[in-house]
Image (spheres, coloured by chain):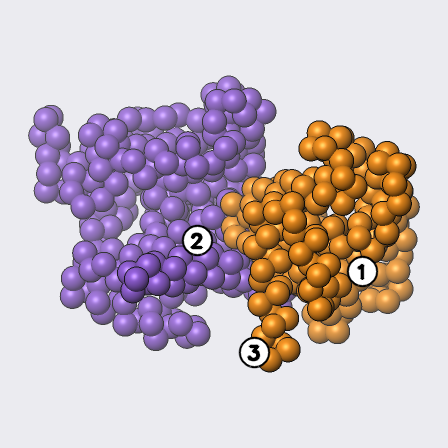
Chain colours: A purple, B orange
């Protein structure tokens, strides 16, 4: 009896959380979103540009710069507060991708780049969960973080809420690009590397970044991807996946636009145009062990699981290296 | 049990009967002391629930305060008009088809009861799955309407389906030819009352214009 009541309570709470999930981005849009997106950073004035050029922060006129923006998975609490296993991987990206400026200061699950542990209504709860996860990375309660961010993934993929949500994340990515030397209005190359839920957020933001004149590609690492309309605009999508990763595979079941029957969907049209490359990495799990960030487990070739992912990404982005 | 308690118990009983497609639901509600208020209660709950979905459209349009409330009232009134037209159509067509006099209030009661599934209308807010849930609820409401129409006019199952189908077709044709005029009228009214354009839809936002400022393009 009590178990039944408890189940009803859990379902009711879950439905309430789902119903309330889009409110954060809608409230942002309704109160300050449009103003914020209208004031994306202006180009540097001449003296500032000369200073930045001398310091090597921006590229000379006409030289296209390359950026890789890393968007974490649904386990992230803030841009820099991601599961521990991701740190060496991101460091490897910095070290190995010589042609790219690697950026990892964007939190993909909030339209204003505000981490969950920042000043929020539920900030105290997220800070407490952060401590719980620090003590025990596999704590069951930490699943709440994943659930909250997963709901934002669905907001991003929703055709009603997606436009405002994606405009927010694209604005934040753009601000970060400018902080790292992108000259607003120039046609710099941007690769959005989205891990897990970050893959979908990357796709959503790509629509607007391309509209801002950037050349955008998406690299999905075990991403849960929908048939996002941005597929019509991006340069290319590489989807790296493991054969044992059922979470990334759920995307093709969950999002009807990825079903083979939906011939005119953005996903199937992009597939037909050769804009999507599905790259099988091997017997990777989504997490726990033998996953994309695992430096300890080795593949039959002797390379670590994470090492093989880095090699593959380098092979795609810098094939000559 | 107090009057309010009895009313609420009756309301939940009616909703449950509508969900079960109980053919005796209308007869049952007619025998209740608050008969018409029970059916209005069902429609009101459904309307409030559906309005939460419309609230999102208003938020995307960046409408706040009294304008937000007025927008919801305007949308509610539009829904009332739609259901009114639907009940009139069913009453006219059904009476002619069945060849018997059925009071308009009886038909209206049936139409209001058939909105019971829309009590879950707030679920359309759920990201990604919400649109599919919305369609499911509409289909469920149509099935409820089918069931109550069969009872109201004493028609068989299949003639009642045909009747609901014809009413739906007439509503569809009406919306096809009349809705552009209504849309223009509502937009003009909105412009006059709120002093701004209403039709900044999700699709407009999707256009990305707010991002393409002169600053960025310079």
Image quarter of residue A246: top left
Tag 2: Cα neighbours inside 10 Å, few (<14), some, or many (≥20)?
Answer: many
Which residue is more in the foreground, B81 or A213? B81
Badge 2: chain ID: A
Task: Look at the numbered disc 2 and give the secondary structure of its residue.
Answer: helix
Between residues B69 and A45, which one lies in front from this camera angle?
A: B69
Q: Is residue A42 left or right of residue B197?
A: left
Nearer the observer: mark 1 or 2; the answer is 1
| Chain where mark 1 sits | B
Marks 1 & 2 on one chain = no
Q: CA distance from mark 3 to mark 1?
A: 34 Å
The quarter in which the N terminus of chain A is drawn is bottom left
Q: Are marks 1 and 2 in contact (CB under 8 Å)?
A: no
Quadrant assignment, res B99: top right
Percent of width and height locating residue A7:
34, 58
The correct choice, above or below, for A319 with respect to A179 in the image is above
Q: Position of residue B183 (x, y in %)?
A: 85, 49
Same subunit, labels 2 and 3: the answer reads: no
Residues behind callouts 3 and 1 on a single chain: yes
**Residue found at x 67% / y 41%:** B147
Does residue B71 lie above or below A184 as drawn?
Answer: below
In the image, A91: left or right of A256? left
Chain letter, disc 3 residue: B
Q: Which residue is mark 3?
A: B1
Q: Can residue A11 be seen in the rendering of this structure?
A: yes
Separation of residues labelled 2 and 3 (CA atoms): 42 Å
Residue A110 seen from this side: no
Q: Nearer the viewer, residue B153 or A132?
A: B153
Q: Disc 2 designates what residue?
A: A151
Q: Which mark is residue B77?
A: 1
For label 3, the SS is loop
């Amino acid at each position: 009896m009590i178990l039944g009541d408890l189940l009803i309570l859990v379902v009711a709470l879950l439905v309430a959380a789902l119903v309330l999930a889009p409110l954060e981005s809608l409230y942002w849009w309704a109160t300050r979103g449009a103003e914020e997106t209208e004031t994306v950073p202006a180009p540097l004035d001449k003296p500032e540009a000369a200073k930045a050029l001398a310091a090597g922060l921006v590229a000379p006129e006409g030289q296209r710069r390359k950026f890789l923006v890393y968007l974490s998975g649904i386990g992230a609490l803030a841009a820099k507060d991601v599961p521990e296993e991701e740190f060496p991987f991101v460091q490897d990206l910095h070290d190995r991708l010589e042609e790219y400026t690697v950026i990892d200061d964007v939190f993909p699950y909030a339209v204003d780049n505000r981490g969950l542990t920042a000043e929020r209504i539920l900030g105290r709860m997220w800070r407490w969960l952060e401590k719980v996860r620090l003590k025990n990375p596999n704590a069951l309660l930490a699943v709440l973080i994943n659930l909250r961010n997963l709901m934002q993934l669905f907001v991003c993929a929703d055709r009603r809420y997606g436009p405002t949500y994606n405009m927010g994340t694209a604005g934040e990515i753009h601000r970060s690009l400018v902080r790292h030397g992108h000259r607003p209005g120039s046609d710099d190359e941007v690769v959005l590397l989205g891990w897990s839920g970050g893959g979908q957020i990357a796709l959503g933001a790509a629509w607007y970044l391309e509209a801002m004149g950037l050349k955008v590609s998406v690299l999905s690492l075990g991403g849960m991807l929908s048939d996002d309309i941005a597929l019509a605009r991006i340069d290319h999508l590489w989807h790296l996946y493991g054969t044992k990763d059922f979470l990334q595979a759920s995307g093709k079941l969950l999002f009807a636009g990825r079903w083979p029957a939906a011939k005119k969907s953005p996903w199937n049209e992009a597939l037909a145009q050769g804009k999507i490359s599905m790259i099988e990495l091997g017997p990777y799990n989504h997490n726990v062990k033998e996953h994309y960030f695992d430096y300890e487990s080795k593949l039959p070739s002797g390379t670590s699981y994470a090492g093989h992912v880095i090699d593959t990404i380098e092979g795609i982005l810098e094939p000559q290296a | 049990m107090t009057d309010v308690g009895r009313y609420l118990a009756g309301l939940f009983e009616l909703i449950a009967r509508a969900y079960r497609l109980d053919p005796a639901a209308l007869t049952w509600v007619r025998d209740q002391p608050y008969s018409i208020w029970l059916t209005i209660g069902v429609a009101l709950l459904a309307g409030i629930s559906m309005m939460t979905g419309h609230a999102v459209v208003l938020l995307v349009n960046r409408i706040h305060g009294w304008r937000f409330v007025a927008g919801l009232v305007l949308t509610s009134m539009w829904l009332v008009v739609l259901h009114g037209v639907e009940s009139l159509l069913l009453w006219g067509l059904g009476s002619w088809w069945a060849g018997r006099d059925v009071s308009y209030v009886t038909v209206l009661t049936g139409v209001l009861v058939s909105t019971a599934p829309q009590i879950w209308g707030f679920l359309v807010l759920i990201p990604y799955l919400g649109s599919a849930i919305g369609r499911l609820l509409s289909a469920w409401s149509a099935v409820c309407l089918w069931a109550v129409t069969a009872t109201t006019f004493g028609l068989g199952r299949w003639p009642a389906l045909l009747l609901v189908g014809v009413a739906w077709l007439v509503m569809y044709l009406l919306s096809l030819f009349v809705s552009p005029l209504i849309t223009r009228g509502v937009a003009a009214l909105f412009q006059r009352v709120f002093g701004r354009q209403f039709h900044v839809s999700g699709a407009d936002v999707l256009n990305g214009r707010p991002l393409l400022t002169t600053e960025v393009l310079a």
